[in-house]
Image (cartoon, rainbow, N blue to C red):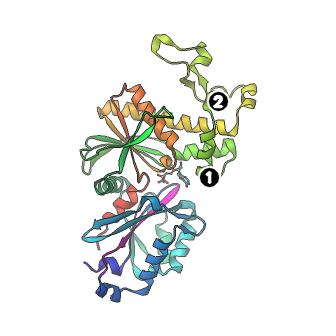
Amino acid sequence: SLAMATTMPWFGMDIGGTLCKLVYFEPKDITPDEAELEVETLRNIRRYLTKNSAYGKDGHRDTHLQMDDVVVRGRRGSFHFIRFPTSAMGKFLELAKDKGMATLVSSVCATGGGAYKFEKNFREVLNLSLHKFDELDSLLYGLQYVEMNNPTECYYWKHPTREDKCEKVNFDFSQPYPFLLVNIGSGVSILAVYGPGVYKRISGTSLGGGTFLGLCCLLTGCNSFEEAIELASKGDNTSVDKLVRDIYGGDYDRFDLPGDLVASSFGNMNSKDKRQLVSREDLARATLVTITNNIGSITRMCALNEKIEKVVFVGNFLRVNPIAMKLLAYALDYWSKKALKALFLEHEGYFGAVGCLLQLHC
Ligand code: ADP
């Protein structure tokens, strides 16, 4: 019904292995009549969410991603994008309880593994039931909606290896099919997408964003993803890894392998002397390069197998992570002799949550 937007808040939640993504639709076309009928609790929640960009210690709103003037089922408004670590779910539920969430709705749309794992907690703390949706269906549905509503959503990296010339360039993704979708979250899923809602999951790897962060914490003692990326951006992997030139003394010409290519990730770290020469920054960089190149290599094989040329990378591993994006762009370019195109999306980690919200029907 038309009054729905004001009588209940619209949320979509994607509760992943590492991060919980929350998308909130703020109606902006509230009529005076609706405003009069609106309950105070709902108005307070809307203000709380839209006037702040931090919630408690762990919650963040990605204000730069906000989408204004979008239409969802006949209502006009804004999408707000919020995330917090899934490990803070207990605190989130208490906060939602304090804000009176439970008095407004009886059910919330949720996807991701946490929609199953935390179902009991939502019922016990908030008396809310979860309306569960499949995470890959939601991911594709959300991606399609956001891409259609944001003309600058999709981009690629031009000259990914040239510091001076490298730039983000808008890509027209209005004719997307077929494409490969590589979702790099805690783990990695690779989908082949042939049309709206027509896809199959073709591969995956457990060596994903969670592996990068876990190994980085072990090797460098860092405590957050942001810190890990910061370290990596100042490091150099070439003393940690064994390169082709460490083995050949130069290029391996016969098979076109350049000397600066990694032959063995972390391959120099068996030597005590070399271990003493590397910094935390170098170890962080090597971890990032190892995980990213492995994903690039699996992706390339999938693309060749499926005969698909467009590859879209999403997931929060790519958040504030231009090093990984450029490596993926380069890996696909280089090894496929330019046949493959690596594409990226601005709302990288939020499509599951958007797709979940869009599937709400009450
Ligand atoms: P999931 O649904 O499995 O939680 P995401 O798409 O949310 O997956 O991506 C999680 C990954 O994103 C982490 O493993 C990490 O590599 C990266 N990441 C980006 N920002 C953060 C952050 N603030 N905290 C933790 N991990 C982050």
- Residue on which the image places disc 2: 240
- Residue on which the image places disc 1: 224
Inspect the magenta stretch and tell me whether residue 67 lies in it.
Answer: no
Residue type at numbered disc 1: Ser
Q: Position of residue 361 (x, y in %)?
A: 28, 70
Q: Is residue 191 left or right of residue 292?
A: left
Residue 127 in sight here: no
Question: Which residue lies most toward the front here?
Answer: 164
Q: Which residues are magenta?
A: 18-30
| Residue 158, image quadrant | top left
Q: Is residue 196 above or below residue 33?
A: above
Q: Secondary structure at mark 2?
A: loop
Residue type at numbered disc 2: Val
Q: Is residue 97 left or right of residue 307?
A: right
Q: Position of residue 112 (x, y in %)?
A: 43, 57
Q: Secondary structure at mark 1?
A: loop
Inspect the magenta stretch and tell me whether residue 28 lies in it.
Answer: yes
Residue 160 in sight here: yes
Query: Label 1 crowding class (10 Å Cα cut-off): few <14, some 14-19, many 20+?
Result: few
| Residue 216, image quadrant | top right
State if disc 1 and disc 2 touch (CB < 8 Å): no
The answer to whether the residue bearing label 1 lies less than 8 angstroms from the nearest atom of ligand 1 is yes
- The alpha-carbon separation of the residues under discs 2 and 1 comes to 22 Å
Q: Is residue 165 left or right of residue 155?
A: right
